[in-house]
Amino acid sequence: MQKVEGSNPSVRIWNFGQLVQWQNIRLTSGRSQVQSLHCPLIMYLVKLLAKKEVAEKTTAFFFEKPKGFKFVPGQFIEIYLAKTLTHEFSIASSPKEKELMIATRMRPSAFKKSLNKLKIGNQAKIGGPFGQFVLHKNKKIPAVFLAGGIGITPFRSMIKDHLNRKITLFYSNRREKDATFLEELKTLQNRNFKLTPLMTKKNGKHIDQKMIKDNVNGWQKTIYYAVGSTGFVQSMVNMLSEMKMKPEQIKTENFSGY
């Protein structure tokens, strides 16, 4: 990764006016709030270190982490492959891991075709980190994660970094072979972290009120995080609203274009 002040193209500083325009774009994408407007946006040129299939038609890409690059689990980056080929991705790696890892369903879009063509050692531009979809600070309040499909990515980062926090993950996929990071998540279970995987095509089970009430102690005073497709997230919000959860107990992030 190169980072040199001045005219080097590997680093690009956006001024305040440009960052305002950037924020307008971000807010229409369904993501959470972006990086503070008081901070300039630095773009890094990073190498692709590795890539591997982590579920059916799902690939994880490992990029070098820029020196001094700091993020909070749950935040995301933007990857630029060309002027018109950009995409946002939750950071799936934890801050303690050496690489920046993202994972995505491999669809036949122009961006993902270009991303998949990257060879080990090739470079890409990234910007960020962005977002405020992060774990609440009060460790005494449990967290429930509601993940639909590839919506697991920000949760992996949070779980890996907070294994001492009370977290219950409900992870919904159509089939087990679609469930990204499932085997790894099983190994991370401990007295604090509890995993409940659901395979909707296998047994028709979906995340519902009874499942939460049966598996979460103190479910009334928990903070809920939902990530996945727009339809999945909306169904989770509707369910939680029916459970009389307050708006401040519900945090969401929609994934679109996957």
Image (tube, rainbow, N blue to C red):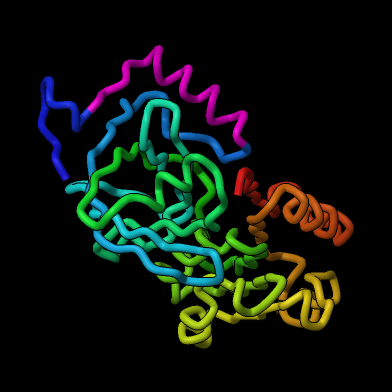
Q: What span is in magenta?
A: 12-29
Q: Is residue 76 above or below residue 150?
A: above
How many marks do you count on the picture?
0
Task: Name the one closer to the observer, 171 or 83.
Answer: 83
Determine the image quadrant of residue 94: bottom left
Residue at 61 percent across and 44 percent down: it is 257
Position in image of residue 194 (x %, y %): 59, 81
Residue at 62 percent across and 74 percent down: it is 168
Q: Does residue 15 belong to the magenta stretch? A: yes
Q: Is residue 4 left or right of residue 94?
A: left
Q: Is residue 140 left or right of residue 242?
A: left
Position in image of residue 182 (x %, y %): 54, 78
Q: Main secondary structure of the magenta part?
A: helix
Position in image of residue 135 (x %, y %): 52, 57
Position in image of residue 162 (x %, y %): 44, 69
Task: Name the one closer to the observer, 112 or 60.
Answer: 112
Q: Is residue 101 left or right of residue 167?
A: left
